[in-house]
Amino acid sequence: MIPMDRCYQPEVECAPREQIRAWQDERLVKQVQNVWDNVPHYRKKMEEKGLTPADIRSVDDLYKLPFVTKADLRDTYPNGMAARPMKDCVRVHATSGTTGKRVMGFYTQHDMDLWEDCVARAIVATGADSEDICQVGYGYGMFTGGLGLDGGSRKVGCLTVPISSGNTDRQITFMQDLGTTLLCCTPSYAAYLGESMKEMGLTPDQIPLKRAILGAEAWSEEMRRDIEKTLGIKAYDIYGLTELSGPGVAYECSAQDGMHINEDHFLAEIIDPDTGEVLPEGSKGELVFTSLTREAFPLLRYRTRDICQLRREKCSCGRTFLKMCKPMGRSDDMLIIRGVNVFPSQVETVLLNQGYPANYQIIVDRVKNTDTLDIQVEMTPEMFTDNLGEISRRQKELVEGLRSMLGLSAKVTLVAPKSIVRSEGKAVRVIDKRKL
């Protein structure tokens, strides 16, 4: 079949299924040997199940391997799951953790090259090429978004604008002055940019943008349509995790109907989140990934906690990769707010460290396409006061503590003792009003 889309690596993205399976079988066997030889923590997990590398001969044996969870990554912080010494690594990224510790991801140069290839595939799948000007509005630094899209953009040959996140007036100025045609950022920020341009009197035909790659947070089809209308573009989804590499694990093509998983690098499963049983393709369950080619930080059967479905069907773009739908939720209590992972336990840690009780409520909403985070915190009877100045001072202390822990700002409201509704069952700590 002749692909209707351009592909960055058509010999891989449109490969026959038999070839993809052969790559996966070969690479899985090699990766299992890699972790056995170089990751004592994972070797111990295999030994506890009575496994050796000889027991894994193909993808058919994948189910035998133990899962890896965030708990494993926390227990081995910072580099206990790394399969290469630090001297062989050229990059480290990190995501937020539940108790202040970050999940670290290490990369050899080989890992960086393959990651950039994956992101380049996503960029070309939108119709972009070396003639495009790519403005990267994801955050740079330890977050994988900015540098991930930056690397893929440069590999395609785009003129890359590493503007990072924020400073909306500057973002719009650079778009106009440089003629940006491809925008990469979170969907909520793309929506905010569209609103800002509208307020400035700019119409879509006055904006050079043609397309956007949006990810790092949940967004609905309704939000996609609004963004596309406001900016006069096509908006494409992208999926990734720091634990696996970053953005580019999966990406949308021109069909805009599910994301193609880069199956030559990542092996996907769907499991029952309660039992760990592997479910048939098409079933709704927890997404599990195995990294087939990563050298420095290879995770086998990593439980993402994202709930979704996998589909294997003929795609109009010509790609033969398996598709995943947008994640439908989480099997844990993690929230994604403005592209940042937030756990209620992080909030609780800050409160307890500052002497507050663990009686709080997190209220998340989306106002003008921007996530808001409001945390209501009960004071103890000893703390309670009607001195507004003292209450304001305490709220500011909590705001700073939460910003340090979470990496984003929150509104904090101190409330009277026992004013947060109690539940006879599990405490309702989170109220998410967003329509995702």
Image (cartoon, rainbow, N blue to C red):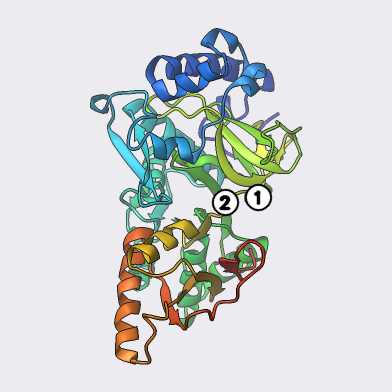
Which residue lies under the disc numbered 2? Answer: 237
Q: Position of residue 122 (x, y in %)?
A: 52, 42
Q: Is residue 152 shown above or below 59? A: below
Quarter of the image that includes the C terminus: bottom right
Location of residue 144 in the rendering, given as x and y in whole percent from the top left corner: 39, 46
Mark 2 and mark 1: span between their CA atoms? 8 Å
Left or right: residue 326 compared with residue 246: right
> In terms of depth relative to the viewer, which is nearer, 417 or 61?
417
Residue receiving disc 1: 256
318 vs 392, nearest the viewer = 392
> Is 75 in front, or is 223?
75
Q: Nearer the viewer, mark 2 or mark 1?
A: 2
- Examine the rendered structure and indicate whether residue 145 appears above or below residue 377: above
Residue 174 numbered mark, or none: none
Quick check: marks 2 and 1 in contact, CB under 8 Å? yes
Residue 402 point in image, percent of width and height: 36, 65
